[in-house]
Image (cartoon, grey):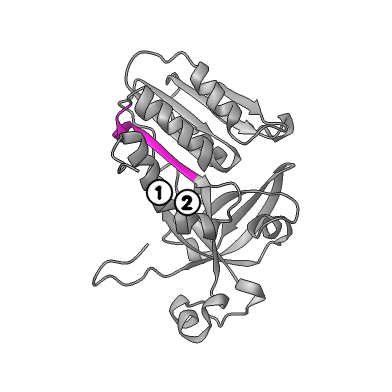
Amino acid sequence: MAEGPGRKPRKPRSAQVVRTERLTPHMQRVVLGGDGLADFAADTCTDHYVKILFPAGGATYPEPFDMERIREEFPREQWPVTRTYTVRHWDAEHRELTLDFVIHGDEGLAGPWATRVQPGATVHFMGPGGAYTPNPDADWHLLVGDESALPAIARSLESLPDGTRAHAFIEVSGPEEEQKIDSDVEVVWLHRGSRPVGERLVEAVRALEFPEGRLCAFVHGEAHFVKQLRHLLRVEREIPREDLSISGYWRLGHNEDGWQASKREWNARIEAEQEGTAPAA
């Protein structure tokens, strides 16, 4: 995100790996701590996220870590590579930041790193960002997502007072990927198997009998199924835009760099198509 006029670029934070844990076959937890989190806070949104800065191509950067210096002294292809992860938990008392990583063996950048990183390793990151928290004025909530949205959905559910009306659908590859969520809301776990990502989520939301009253929804994950559910909620169900948090966290066939480069255009085009404001072909 570009900085506004007169604003200094935000400086990266540094933290150390405290411990790691394999939650499920395809989900790895990494807990960060250290003095670099002294003024960190992530307690206003349930979708808070940080952007981890990974060295590009094994580059070694001077210490202290300084993005301005790196941009001045290193060629563009050796600048850090950014990957975005939701804050699963922030413990202000113990100054510990918990992040969960979806892993697919040696595929990708962040997943393999999360499985191999050792306590004591230093991590540089930006953030937090975030925009969503369940609206207490809603009559009921709908939370829908794949593995990438699981941390945000779990955190959102855990923030809801007992007795809150909510429907939560989370799609994972199989039953071994289900997780315990500390909430009295019954999560519907959908097992993808060999089916396309998000297909079962679309079916589940279409089959849901919507309760009366004001709905506030959180729908995040792979961009194609998010597009379908946006049409269902915004166009077919006519849910006001302000009551919807809907966005693609990732897109099949794209890494984060490619997706982030095209995401704004993709979202604008989808919104124009679904709102009926797209120009005639």
Question: Mark 1: which amino acid?
Answer: Gly
Question: Mark 2: which amino acid?
Answer: Tyr
Which quadrant of the view contains residue 10? Answer: bottom left
Q: Nearer the viewer, residue 56 or 13?
A: 56
Asked if residue 243 lies in the magenta stretch, the reply is yes
| Residue 222 visible in image | no
Rendered image: mark on residue 49? 2
Q: Residue at horizontal 51%, vertical 48%?
A: 87
The relative height of residue 223 versus residue 76 in the rendered view (above or below) is above
Asked if labels 1 and 2 touch by Cβ distance under 8 angstroms, the answer is yes
- Residue 32 in picture, x, y percent from top left: 58, 57
Query: How many angstroms separate mark 2 from mark 1 (CA)?
Result: 6 Å
Q: Nearer the viewer, residue 34 or 108?
A: 108
Residue that extends furthest to the front in the rendered view of this protein: 281
| Left or right of 259, for residue 281 | left
- Residue 79 in picture, x, y percent from top left: 53, 75
Q: Nearer the viewer, residue 273 or 204?
A: 273
Rendered image: mark on residue 130? 1
Question: Circle 2: is it few (<14), some (14-19), or many (20+) Cα within 10 Å?
Answer: many
Asked if residue 253 lies in the magenta stretch, the reply is no
Check disc 2 and report its element: helix, strand or loop: strand
| Left or right of 147, for residue 268 | left
- Residue 38 in picture, x, y percent from top left: 45, 62
State the extent of the magenta-drawn residues as a range. 239-248
Q: Residue at horizontal 28%, vertical 39%?
A: 277
Q: Residue at horizontal 46%, vertical 55%?
A: 262
| Left or right of 111, for residue 35 | left
